[in-house]
Image (spheres, grey):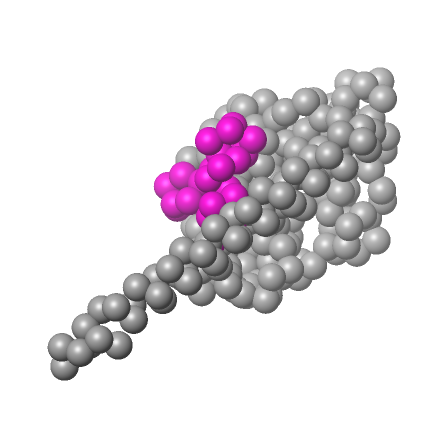
Amino acid sequence: MSAENIGNVPAHRVAAGRPRPAPSTGSFRPRHSGDLARARVLVAVGTDTHPFDRLIRWLEEWHHGVDEDVGLTVQHGHTRAPAVPGAVTFLGHGELQAAMAEADLVVCHAGPATILEARRQGHLPIVTPRDPARGEHVDDHQLLFARRLGAAGMVALAETREAVIGALTEGLADPFRFTVAADPVAATTRRAAVEQVGRIVEELVVASARRRQGARWWSWLLPDRHGERR
């Protein structure tokens, strides 16, 4: 095993028996030998049609001070393209896998599939959940899901600008801070994890819907501005 680079995967991110990532076929730019001193950061906001301008704005603010030291891949989806290099609207599944294998740090929304893939590739992802109160999603299941995973230590939860920038700064200083044991060939384990995540998300969505229904029910018992029941 080379101490420098194996199949475009940084040496500190290669696990024993790890297969080479699928080659990129789109806008993802693989790391070349001249880039080895630069940290690679992947940001993925998923495919949801709601914009996630808040995370993109924080990323832009952070990048101004580190642009010489960081190579970016930013999958921005339906959010406006960030004013930073490396922006791409969408990544196919193979491209996303290759980008995660190449990255030193992964920042993402609280999409279960994205989080699972990041951990499968050996990352402790820095996760900023979409907030429905800001028009970033239809409900609060990402908030509930991310907070549950954050409490379990399965993601680095970052809900504020300070938390995101702090995590990125810490990750650049110590790349091992946001890594986990990669297990890319354990298909059975992965299926079980996907099923468990699916159950958790379903429970959170149901609980959220019940709270909203309860709020609507109680609103009928409250007096309106004329003092009458609704």
Percent position of residue 157, x then y: 47, 38
Main SS, magenta residues: helix
Percent position of residue 8, x then y: 79, 34
Left or right of 141 in this view: 221: left
Left or right of 65 in this view: 14: right
**Relative depth, front residue between 123 and 5:** 123
Residue 143 visible in this rendered orientation of the protein? yes
Q: Is residue 50 above or below residue 131?
A: below
Which part of the image, by quadrant, shows the C terminus?
bottom left
The part of the image, by quadrant, that contains residue 19 is: top right
**Is residue 153 a member of the stretch shown in magenta?**
yes
Q: Residue furthest left?
A: 227
Residue at 29%, 68% (x, y): give it: 219
Residue 65 visible in this rendered orientation of the protein? no
Percent position of residue 207, x then y: 48, 50
Residue at 68%, 22% (x, y): give it: 181
**Relative depth, front residue between 122 and 209:** 209
Number of marks present in the image shown: 0
Which part of the image, by quadrant, shows the N terminus?
top right
**Relative depth, front residue between 68 and 210:** 210
**Is residue 208 a member of the stretch shown in magenta?**
no
**Relative depth, front residue between 15 and 38:** 15
Left or right of 4 in this view: 210: left
Left or right of 13 in this view: 186: right
Residue at 35%, 65% (x, y): give it: 217
The part of the image, by quadrant, that contains residue 42 is: top right
Looking at the rendering, the stretch of residues picked out in magenta corresponds to 140-165
Q: Is residue 46 above or below residue 19?
A: below
